[in-house]
Structure formats: structure tokens, C-alpha cells
Image: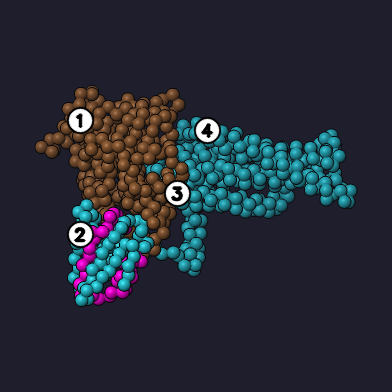
Chain colours: A cyan, B brown
Amino acid sequence: MPHTSLISVHTQDDRLTVAGRGAWTSEHANELETAVGDAVATYPSPKGVDFDLAGVERMDTFGALLFERLRRAWDEKGIATSIQGLAPRYKILLEEMARAGRDQRPAPRRQEAVLERVGHEVVNTGADALALLNFIGATIAAMLRVLAKPRTFRFTAMVNQLDRVGFRAVPIIMLITFLIGCILAQQGIFNFRRFGAEIYVVDMVGVLVLRELGVLIVAIMIAGRSGSAYTAELGSMRMREEMDALRVMGFDPIEVLVVPRIMALVIALPLLTFIGSMAAIFGAGLVSWGYGGITPEIFMQRLKSAIDLDQFNVGMIKAPFMAATIGIVACLEGMRVGGSAESLGAHTTASVVKAIFLVIVMDGVFAMFFAAINM
Amino acid sequence: MDTQPTPAAAPLANGKEAIIKVRDIVVGFGDRIILNHLDLDVYRGEILGFVGTSGGGKSVLTRTILGLVPKRSGMVEVFGENLDDLNESQRSAVERRWGVLFQQGALFSSLTVKQNIQFPLRENLKLSQRLMDDIAFAKIEMVGLKPDVAEKLPSELSGGMIKRAALARSLALDPEILFLDEPTSGLDPIGAGDFDELIRTLQQTLGLTVFMVTHDLDSLHSVCDRIAALAEGKVIAQGTIETMMQATHPWLRAYFHGSRARAVQRGRG
């Protein structure tokens, strides 16, 4: 016979008397649930049940719900139940619970199976590529519209963006590229020294930084620093219906928000690439002097003979294309943010990952192109 | 084991127990003083409507009581305990006994409605999954939503449904005090009327004390037992709606006798 501190059950001629005691509240919900389950299991089919709730000092939704579960277990088998001693203040609560839980519950949200997810991903990748093309088209169309009517170009917005993605990025870009230059020179000298070819470190750093590393590192930094900011800004504007507000006022969000941002990046990235390359070469020069014993005069002389304008051009030509890629991917991801905070996070991540991936792919394509034209 | 502290016998005023006591509160941001030596009592079992000018500090007072905004001086006593004197575990015990409905709902956007309601249950109590589901669906029905809302994300709900789902979450732990920040703002008049009725029903069912910041004259007339008005950083008047109607303060006269107020009264005969 289950006796707990919350419920005690007595039998008399197959009639049950279930007496409640103590606090039927959330703190004791666990204990009460066990007691309720035991009572039903021990007495599956009595002739009748009398509930005596006079001993229940306090009751909340948890207690009322569990009481209703107990009563319903017998009630559904057609066993007559009666309630006595219930404090009047809990009457409405019990009635409410007696009504609750009768409607059909929806099926829980299904987790996707592995294969299903793979399938979705494949379809999504196709849709992604299509969306990217669509967005590039819309952006170019907006730019052409602006070109036809230059007065509609949002110059102030672009300058503001230029300040944020260009000017304010200068210190961190300089610091990182400076360090990369230092490391390159140190590694070069350390390894070239074995066959007495330290001086060639200048050629290596000069070519590597100007052609490839300068622009690549700066583009990756900017994808992480400014691309993510673009996505998050546009995404939260979408969540707060600011995009819709623009649209109903007769503005094209791409023209107002996207074009100035992409233009700012296209201007800023070549400038940052130049600054970054100079910082890297400066770092390499310092290390060559201190660690390799190559004086600045020799370093400069060697640099002049090692590189020509082509090397410099190769790096600089790539910069605006990479900037446009970063800007378009970041803005597109921002425009695709859904209603939840999770979606904002997912799209910001996707923005940075895709931008960096595309920047590297593009660098490879450019490398093949420049090799083909002997540049 | 009974972990819930029994409500300490709070000092009685007019035979009623003050469940929230705010004394001499000063809150300001920078040079601006928002609440200037404000006093307020909320009595157990009542629905208190709190009115005031826009930007006058209604929400600031709510947030100060809840501990979201720091105060410069003064005292907040809830369930007879000074909130400044509590250690962390005592404080979270107090926080479990109140529920808050934020103006925009503040549902967790990455969780379904059911998970939102179960979040405080999961964190505070050790319950079986079956009981948690039962509780979640019971709460959803109590606030007048259909069970199929349970599996939806907040972004898939309408404004009124978000309010109700957020109310269900604030009721998850069966709080004794319910804070409502403009519960009917953004609802249509019928929806707002239903919501008022819902709050009244819940208050009677669960024996709640309700602290309601509102602008809705209909709510003030239909559900509030008592009204407190905030102006110039102080509570300038409190009492029943009749007392408010007779008040002489110019802002109160404008508020309760303006064209909208007259329309509400005509509607009530």
C-alpha cells in the first residue's frame, strides 16, 4: 500500500480512499509523480475512488496536473471518483486542469536523418550558386542604374563605409602583415644560410609579398573583419523589417545598402593591400638587417633588381576583384538571414567561410591567367 | 524537504500584505534622474496597473525591481526580503518566484515554444520528460493557444501569439508575482480585451499578484484593482480607477479625461 509524505491510500471493500497531504507544488512534483504512478499501478481497477484533499496545504499547476492525471487514470476506466475537502481557492485551478490536455498534440519537430541532410545540402548548394548569380545580377543592375543617374549614388554612405572598412582597418592590417614579413624573412634567411644564399631572401620576400601574400592576407583579414560586419548589419536590419521599410518607401535596398558597401570595399582593399605589402617588406627588411646582416642599402638595391612593376601589378589587379567577391558574398548572406538569432549566426559564419574560400579559388584562377600571359 | 521559504510575515498596511515594497528609490543615467525618491507598495493578490508618461521611467522602475538596472540609492523588498541583502542562491530562489513578460516577448528565437516553456523547468527542477511535456501543454492551453503552437519557432508566430507564448513561459514555474510590460501593446482591441480577461482568469486561478505597466485605458478600467501613476520621477497618485478619475494633477486629468478616456467611459455606460 503506497504511503508517502504526499499521498496515502486506504482500501475498504474495494473502495479506495486517496488522501493528499503536504505541499503539492513544483518542488515535490517528482515525488508526487512517482506516488501517482504507484497508486495507479497498485490499484488498477477499484470499485470507486474517494479523494480527500483536505490535507493538501498548497497546490500549484504541477500538483493540480498530477492530481488530474491520477483521477483521469481511473476515470477513463469508468471508475467513479469523487473529491472532498478541496480548499476553495484551488477549485478553479483543478477545473482548468480537468479541461486541459484533451486536444491532439502535434508531432515533435523531426531531426533530419544523415542521408536526408546530405540531400538537402546538395540541393542547397545548387540554390546557393543560383542565388549568388541572381544577386550579382541585381547588384550590377543597381550599379548601372546609379551610373545612369550619378546623383542617386549614396556618396556619404560610401565614405562612411570607407572609414569603417578602410581607414579603421589600417592599424591591424599593418601589424599583421608586418609580422608576416618578419616571419618570412627569418625563415628564408635561416634556410638559405645553409647554402650561403641569404641574399636571395630579398627576392623571395619581394616577389611573394607583392604577387600573392600581401593581397591574400589582407583579403582574408577583411573577409573576417568587414565581411562579417556587413552580414550581421544587413541581417539584423532584415530581422527588424528595416529592409521592408526601405522597399515600401520606394527605395531599392541593394541600391541604398549594398552598392555603397561593395564600392567602399573595392576602393579600400587595393589601398590596404598596398599598405600591407609595404609593411610586410618593411618587416622583412628589419629582420634581414638584424638577423641576416643585410644592410638596408643592400636590401633596397637587391629589391630593385629582383622585382619589376609586373610583380606589383599582379597583386594590385587582384585586389578589387577580391573585394567585390567579399562584398557580394557578405551582403548576400546578410539578405538571407531569417527570423532567429541562430540564423544570423549561421549566415555570418557562412559569409566569412564562403568569402575566404572564393578569394583563394580566385587567387588560383588569377595565377593561371597571369602565367598564361607571362606576367 | 521543503526548500521553498515560507513568505515572511511582511508588515501589513490596511490589513494587506505588501509583497513588493519599493522605498526611496533613486535611478538615473548620467545627469538625468529618472526615478527621484520613489515609494511604491504592491499588495499580495492584487493587479496593479502602473501608468505614466512615455519615457517617464515606468519600464525603468520595473527593471530596477527586477535588478536589471542599478539604483543609486533606496531599497527594494520582495517577499519581505531586501534584494540587496541576498546572496546568489537566495536571490535565484526569489527570481524563481516571479515571472516576467517583456514587451516584445523575448522568447528565445532558436527554441520552439515548448522548449521555451520548458527551459526554466529544466534549469530549476528535475522532472520527467512526460511531466515537462504535460506542464508545457497545460500552460499553452492556459494562455489560450492551440497545442500545435508548441512545436513552432517564435519567428513563425504572430504578435499576439508571441505575447501569449511568452506569458506561458513566464508562468512556467508558477510564480507568485507576474510582471507585465505593456502586455496589450501591439494587439488589436479584441485581442487586447481577450488578453486582459486572460490575465484576470490566470490571476484568480493561480492566486497571482500582477504588476502591469500599461497604457491601455481599457485594461485600467477592466482588470486593474489599483492604479499607480508615475510623473516627475515619483508616484503622484495611487488608488482605484474612481480615485484616479477625481485626481486633480493636470497630467492625470489629461490622461483620464482625454478624448480617448471619454470614449472608453462612454463604451462602459
Query: Who's the residue at 25% across and 67% down the image?
Result: A18
Label 2, label 3: how many angstroms apart (C-alpha)? Answer: 50 Å
Label 3, label 4: how many angstroms apart (C-alpha)? Answer: 27 Å
Residue at disc 3, secondary structure: helix
* Picture layout, residue B130 above or below residue A283: below
Residue at disc 1, secondary structure: helix
Tally the marks. 4
User: In the image shown, does B95 or A358 lie closer to the viewer?
Assistant: B95
Mark 1 and mark 3, same subunit? no
Identify the amino acid type marked 4.
Answer: Asn
Identify the amino acid type marked 1.
Answer: Met
Residue tagged by mark 2? A85
Q: Earlier in the sequence, mark 3 or mark 4?
A: 4
Q: Position of residue B124 (x, y in %)?
A: 41, 54
Task: Tell me if residue A89 is in the magenta stretch.
Answer: no
- Magenta span of residues: A33-62
